[in-house]
Image (cartoon, coloured by chain):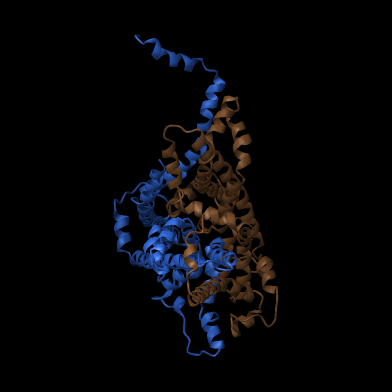
Chain colours: A blue, B brown
Amino acid sequence: MTQTRAEIAPILARTRRAPKEVLQDLLPKIVLAPSFALILVFVYGFIVFTGFLSFSGSKLLPDFSTWVGFDNYVRLFKHPNWIVSLKNLAIFSVLYIVICSVIGLALAIFLDQKIRGEGLLRPIYLYPMALSFIVTGVAWKWFLDPGIGLEHAMHQLGWASFSFRWIKQGDMAIYTIVIAAIWQSSGFVMAMFLAGLRGVDNEIIKAAQIDGASTVMIYRRIIIPLMRPVFLSAFVVLAHLAIKSYDLVVAMTDGGPGTATWTPALFMTKFTFGRNEMGMGAASAIIMLMMIFAIIVPYLYSELGQKK
Amino acid sequence: MSAASQDVATRNGIFARAAIYAVLILFAVYYLLPLYVMLVNSLKPLDEIRHGNMLALPHEWTIAPWLSAWSTAQIGVSPTGLKPYFLNSVMMVVPAVAISTILGALNGYVLTKWRFRGDTVVFGMMLLACFIPFQIVLIPSARILGLLHLAGTVPGLVLIHAIYGLGFTTLFFRNYYEAFPTELVRAAQIDGASFFQIFRRILLPSSAPIIVVTVIWQFTNIWNDFLFGSSFSSVDSIPLTVALNNLVNSSTGVKEYNVHFAGAILAALPTLIVYIVSGRYFVRGLMAGAVKG
């Protein structure tokens, strides 16, 4: 008991405080606690739960009595449906990300040329983002249906040889989903790029113009390189949407014809709830989570880091 | 927001400008085409869709498909139309949006104005929760809902949507309150204002824009959700998106395309109206969701 007065003072001060003040100090944490607890349980706890499931022999219901090690993962990566799902995800995400970015950037640059009617065009490009993927799916499913949609319409107009039946062809159906997904998201990418373009410093461009750079050159050498952060944000948003893509596939093809348009998200629900392969379903969900974290975590880390 | 790059524009030739307008209009057609197809075909008799041209205007205008989609179309086992499911969606969306927005506002307030050790970690964990693929929580969520006796009910869906919306609502409010002068909060504290008084009297009055952004974002996401709706609902609690999918993809009976289109527009209408009325806030929400930190 050789504490000095200086050490004791704060302890005394703390003990002397009225309970009401203590409550005021704790209140912010008490307010935040329920939300944080819910996230801890419903997000992180559930991830751990699903992680355990993926090593269990669960079939119809969670079953923690039989452990199978990495067996679910081994079976997953040997299963032709999962391989098809991964292949489709690769095709879908590459085309979706690249084409959305190209269309988004092009439309943003074009809209930025003192266009009359920009106020009318912008909302037209963006409204699909407000729709449910199910609605988008219904619209495109019937529009691309050879029996009543585009092909039928062209035949009615007299172009008898016109043929567009990708949605019925196993090898092409995934591309119809790409078309619909691009329709839904490219306007949003346009809005991101437009905001980026409007934030470019005027002085740099004036200087380049004085040096005699052409319009195309200014865009290629100065403005587009300045859009790097926007490209990154667009990539992260589109990539994580691609990995999660589920509703649109269900509405348009429900995975068909056959298994031609399965994606990992579809695989997870079909195997877990349709085929009573909960262990494999959990394993596929863990792989999806790892893919998303591989993209999101470094991004969030750098975004949060910059702030400090 | 200076119109910086627009200065480049003025030097384009007339042909270049014509080409730019052509491309822009072409894309406007691309974006409007599916909506046009849905609209005109929802106003045609079924025969006209089968034998006619999907791109043509109706010869014979009819609102029968709309009436059918709303109140008599066969969905699942019962010929109820989309009406009861529309109501399910409303009863699911309103409380879920309210709860997640209120909690998000309080969280944002604490995380910016009452900072404590480890608050960045707490925020980081909540932020990361925005992006998880929901497949990862499907199985345990179904278990929990069962344990709480909420499986297959609207309150169960409310709970799920409210919880998984918390990350985004907290993000929105945190970023907004970050820019709010902390001195005002400290001054009020010295004057003896309590935690909730400060929130109600000082922060809340200037929070209207972010509340609008958050409500729109949550409303659009929850209204449009399909995964949770299809996993956790039973006959009495099926939300509209799931009912629409059942209507369109039912394998029995004649495919009534005109009814499907009318139903799709009905399902899209609430979010479309929100977008048309307050597009500015809608876009701001999208951007805030995309450009984090």
The mark tally for this picture is 0
Residue A118 to residue B53: above or below: above
Q: In the image, what residue occupies the spot 59% across and 58% down?
A: B279
Task: List x then y, in percent, for residue B192.
Answer: 60, 24
Task: List x then y, in percent, for residue B130.
Answer: 46, 49
Query: In the current view of this chain or complex, which residue is farthest to the top?
Result: A2
Q: In the image, what residue occupies the spot 59% across and 71% down?
A: B35
Q: Which image quarter: residue A138?
A: bottom right
Q: In the image, what residue occupies the spot 29% across and 50% down?
A: A69
Q: Image check: A125 left or right of A57?
A: right
Q: Which image quarter: residue A83?
A: bottom left
Q: Is residue A153 at least partly visible in the picture?
A: yes
Q: In the image, what residue occupies the spot 52% across and 41% down?
A: B179
Name the one closer to the observer, B154 or B222: B222
Residue A253 to residue B95: above or below: below
Task: List x then y, in percent, for residue A79.
Answer: 33, 64
